[in-house]
Image (spheres, rainbow, N blue to C red):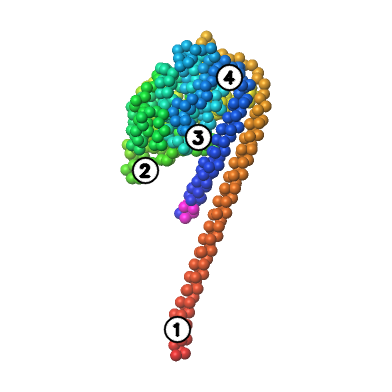
Amino acid sequence: SSAWKRTKRAVVTSSAAVCDYAAVWVALPMIRLFLDWPMYYYALVWRPAAIAQDGKKVLENVCLERRVPYGDRDEGEVLDVIWPTGQSFEGNITKCKGAVLYAHGGGWVSCNSEVLLHSVTPLAREGFVVYSIDYPLSPEARYPRAVFSVLKALSWMRMRDGVSEVFLLGDSAGGGLVTMAAALLENRSMLTELLSHCSSSSPSSSSPSSSSHHHSYSWVNRASFPKIERVCSVYGVLDQHSWKEWTISAKAVQFCLSKYKGGRRRRSSLQEIKGGQAARRRGHRDDGNGPELNPEGSIEMFERVTLGDIPSPELKNYPETLLICGHSDPLKESSRTAKRCLEEAGHAVVLREYPGIHGFLGFPIQWTLGTWKSNTAPATEDICTFFSCGPEGIDNPKERVRYPRKSVPFDWSLLVVAAAVVISGLVAFSVFANILSISIEMVGCGLRSTASLVWLLLCTTMTTTNLDAQFNGGGLISLQQRG
């Protein structure tokens, strides 16, 4: 029984390792290739004719400055600046409603600003200046690199454009980034503690734009940041547990989260194990996938990768928050958990749920067959109203932003993109199948070689035993008789 359990555990572990290897080296590169080429060029070529959530063309009445470096360009720290036409911008945003920093989604491992830019241009037409950022992706850049890239972008906005107040917006993984950035800037003791964890292995750096391979964050102590007025998370990853009941979707989220978090520290003493057990009795989760617990039972600072990992008593300051999610989105539970966490800490928070799946705000409305009227459009109205008037304006008919619900023509580019998805999937499947076939063949050769070696040893042992028996049994007597 114990041997069978060990064999089963070994098979499960090996299967998980093969799947993880295939995801990292086959699926993830194919996803990135698809987003960085077909979707990227789709955005550039088809966007001028595309329609945004407010019923206008995506680039109508807005100006766009692409790929401005706010940090290390080689690390992907660039941003797009979008502002309304007719505003005298030129480094002065006082005539606009305010500045919005937008962090795109993609599970921390893929996507870019260009692909999702269409979803935030309505904000520019409402009078906001939008800074849509790219940030270093995982698994090459582990936590907290992306969070500090958000802080670096905020510092850059303060230095270059004189932004003194800012609104934060993020969807999916980007929602997790902006909510964590807000928590760190509004509670500087947590930022100091996180910096202390990073400083032991990072050399000093003289500026936020330094391209140190060790990724020093010492510039944070000297940086100046704008005040965060409000935060909006759209189907964000805001905790590490609530979405796990959605079995299939949870596997994908867990994979992305594991690549974002990186390696985990293992407990090595009985005292630590007992400390973790005591923490679980006090209500903390520690199931091997969530935040690490120290011997005292609290969550290690370096394991606080989402807003839901921060205990409510430590979240002393936090700006007004709007949370948006879809009814059919597994991450809706994450938004609900974050709402409870913020309410327990005494902060203003509004949760809005709409019919739709994960990522509904990022789909071009011409692809949605009319469903954008019930989710994408009202969600964008919520965001614009929230940033303009605060949470009380969302349900106020006099202050709420309203968009027309005109029918839009079907965009045939969907078929082109769908074909690209199918081709990419077939290529990825073919590559994975070849890798799996080679791996199985190598394992089979290894097993056959092992079996041959065992058989050779067994035959040698049996032959030796027979010779010994003959020599000690009858062979020696026959020789004595002959003698």
Nearer-N-terminus badge (1/4) = 4
Instruction: Identify the mark nearer the N-term, 1 or 2.
Output: 2
Residue 28 in the image: x percent, y percent?
Answer: 54, 38
Q: Earlier in the sequence, mark 3 or mark 4?
A: 4
The disc at residue 476 is 1
Q: Nearer the viewer, residue 390 or 158?
A: 158
Looking at the rendered structure, the kind of residue marked 1 is Leu
Q: What is the CA distance from the residue labelled 2 to the residue labelled 4?
A: 53 Å
Q: Position of residue 305 (x, y in %)?
A: 42, 32
**Magenta stretch bounds:** 3-7
* Residue 322 circle label: none
Report the number of discs.
4
- Amino acid type, mark 2: Arg
**Are there few (<14), some (14-19), or many (20+) residues within 10 Å of tag 1?**
few
Residue 116 lies within the magenta run: no
Q: From the image, which quarter does the C terminus lie in?
A: bottom left
Q: Which amino acid type is marked by label 4?
A: Leu
Q: In this figure, which residue is indicated by the disc labeled 3?
A: 109
- Mark 4 crowd level (few <14, some 14–19, many ≥20, 10 Å Cα): many
* Comes first in the chain, label 2 or label 4: 4
Mark 3 and mark 4: Cα distance apart in space: 27 Å
Give the mark nearest the N terminus, 1 or 3.
3
Given this view, does label 1 or label 3 mark the residue nearer the observer? 3
Picture residue at 50% right of the left edge, 33% below the top: 107
Please provide percent x and percent y for residue 477.
45, 85
Q: Which mark is residue 267?
A: 2
- Looking at the rendered image, the disc whose residue lies closer to the viewer, 3 or 4, is 4
**Residue 42 falls in image quadrant:** top right
Helix, strand or loop at label 2? It is: loop
Residue 159 visible from this viewpoint:
yes
